[in-house]
Image (cartoon, rainbow, N blue to C red):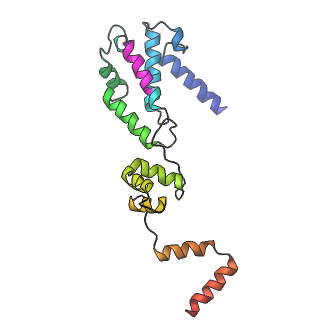
Amino acid sequence: MCSRRIFFRKKRYMAAHYSFVPAPPETLPKDGWQFAAQTLTLLKSAYHDKHASTDRFNERLELAEQYRIFDRLPTPEQPYGSLDAMLQAEIGASKDEAVATKLREKAGNPHNSNSSQRIIKGGANSQYRRARLERDRPDILEAFNRGEYRSLRQAAIAGGIEKERSNLEKAQKAFEKLTKDERETFLIWVSEQ
């Protein structure tokens, strides 16, 4: 019951704040207020959605600029007058700042499928190391490809992406992998040393 109440509250809020019914953008007249309002809504959504692709945001931005929606919004009687003025009022950033923000999100978001700097999670695997080297230290990756490093792990250590494990850390990691009987045998051996 509670979720239905919230749904209807949202619906009333949307109806009060937006006096248009969403329709496919290609069916709306490009010089109308409804097209301008819908384009702005989609533009803001693409900007604030951290997982939205940069391409989607840029497409909406091009539409806004091409059809000069800022000349009809917020009202035709009192328009913003310029794209930067509209963006500043609606999302709090100019065009250049908004594009730069989306590019930074693209670079730092491993879930963005359009990102050329995609990092594969997994820590200690070769794909992760290669992706990190490609993004952060392309010079070290080139040296690895030339054969200057025996493994990607060595290249990642040289690039500062991973740290060299101490002998104690290696022993602790190995101890964790031992079975219960092997641990007891090892501890007896250690006590004799």
| Residue, far bottom | 192
Residue for point 38% across, 14% down:
66
Q: Looking at the picture, how far across and down is residue 35, in whole percent?
A: 46, 12
Decide: is 95 above or below 155: above
Residue 111 within the segment the image draws in magenta: no
Which portion, as a residue range, is magenta? Answer: 57-69
Front residue (pair 12, 105): 105
| Residue, far front | 146
Image quadrant occupied by the N terminus? top right
Q: Looking at the picture, how far across and down is residue 155, in whole percent?
A: 43, 59
Considering the whole magenta stretch, tell me its main secondary structure: helix
Decide: is 183 above or below 14: below
Image quadrant occupied by the C terminus? bottom right
Q: Looking at the picture, how far across and down is residue 142, in whole percent?
A: 40, 52
| Residue 137 placement, left or right of 23 | left
Residue for point 34% across, 11% down:
71
Front residue (pair 75, 30): 30
Q: Looking at the picture, how far across and down is residue 48, in whole percent?
A: 44, 32
Looking at the rendered structure, the number of numbered marks drawn on it comes to 0
